[in-house]
Image (spheres, helix red, strand yellow):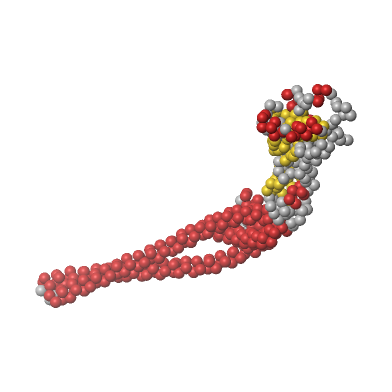
Amino acid sequence: MQALRMIVTGLPKFAASIGMIVVCQSFVAFKAHGDTLCAATGHEAGQVAEKPAATRGEAVQIGDKVNLAIFERAVRQEDKWGPQAGGADLSRSFIQRAELSGERTVQENGALALPLLGQIAVEGCSLDEAEKTVAKAFEQAFHRPAFATVLSIEHNPIFIVGPVKSPGSYKYSAGMTVLHAIALSGGINRAQDAWLAIEAVREESKAEHLRVNTARALARAAVLRAERDGSGITIPVQLAALIGNAAAAAAVEDEKALRSLALSIRQAREAALRSAAGNAASELEAAKMRLPSLDASIKLRSDRLQAVTSLNSSGIASKAQLVEVQTALVDMEAKRQDALAAVAATKQKRDQANAELIAFNLEYQSQRELEISTADRETRENWENIAASQGILTAMLPQSENSSMKAAAFVFEIHRHTPDGLRIIPADEITELKPGDLIRIKAAGGKPSMEKANTAINTSAKW
């Protein structure tokens, strides 16, 4: 003991002369479960060092941060003469190897990289085994007795994602399960239930509106095609799959009634145009019927003019009579010109009426084809929107309807890196975790009421 006090008293001068060498006084304590050396620094002789914070039985994993302290046995003068009188002295003097001590990370190959000692495999070892392995490597390298102790060990964190209050990374502890991880993350985020319920109702209302519009578009297209082809109306398979046979027949009848109103308006307009065209044709025929009588009158007056002219030359007819006959012929020819103008005008009127009728029919046919194309486009867009709403509802409704921790409501997966690569492991609440695990929580199940929409969507893919 006197020698120890001399060493401690002369320590500052000794350290100043040779560098920062730390002299530690430790005791060898033999435990019932094995030969474990525990080092204590700065304690009086006879005091036993406290147990490190790390659990001695846990295994070392890849990525662990190990706070390691390595001590080398210091050769003393008394050791040359053997054990002192009075029995075995358990006290020894050790020098900490600062260049080997400190925090080290277990590399991908499962080894600790220590200066001068190289790679030391420790993966899967308990802390006691790791200490003995490091001490043995030191003794083999330097041929001097030493011991190592793990002051602390920090494992890779675990990660959790999904409907929890605080997803992220959390410190790993030995024996941790999925339920522990959920508790660390604040539990299932029940605060979102009200919001999810509101959004689910809104999305369901949107999906229902889309289904109604899709049914109307399908029924309208069926009625328009039947009118165009001059055939009977056939209920589309997609419509029956979406809303049922009875509702599909009712939807077709509703669209047929609406189309009847449009047809009645169209027929009235067409009848008016046909009537105008017919009246113009009648006027043309009437105008043409006046031409023969006018031609006969003109011929008669032309013959009379020739006769009067001959008589006038003979001195029988007077000049006044000749002028009167000439005036009558000119008037008749003027009436014929007026009749020809009337014929041309009525013919133009008839042609215009016929052109309007033809244009009306072409426009009506084009409008009908446009309505069919619009109905088909609306149907395709609505199918896509219904599928999107179904996906949103499938993701939202299981959470909003049941936020409990039952397996029927949630599915747990563990994403774990192994030597063979990434593995996805099905789990439950009591599955034990390993450092670096990622826990993914997903909602399970779907919404039964969407089955009919699923069938309609699948049918529409064929259509």
Above or below, 157 relative to 12? below
Q: Quadrant of residue 377?
A: bottom right
Instruction: Tell me where residue 341 appears, x and y as whole percent.
Output: 29, 68
Q: Nearer the viewer, residue 433 or 5?
A: 5
Between 207 and 66, the residue placed more toward the observer is: 66
Q: In the figure, is residue 216 to the left or right of 286? A: right
Q: Residue at x 46, y 59 (%)?
A: 362
Answer yes or no: is residue 406 visible. yes
Asked which quadrant contains residue 456, the reply is bottom right
Q: Residue at x 79, y 43 (%)?
A: 175
Total count of labels: 0
Nearer to us in this view, 317 or 166: 166
| Location of residue 425 in the rendering, given as x and y in whole percent from the top left corner | 74, 42
In the picture provided, is 167 more to the left or to the right than 231? right
For the residue pair 348 and 227, the one nearer the viewer reads as 227
Q: Position of residue 13 (x, y in %)?
A: 69, 32
At horizontal 12% and vertical 72% (from top left) the residue drawn is 312
Is 375 on the left or on the right of 349, as rendered? right
Quarter holding the N terminus is top right
The x, y position of residue 191, in whole percent, is: 70, 59
Give the image quarter of residue 69.
top right
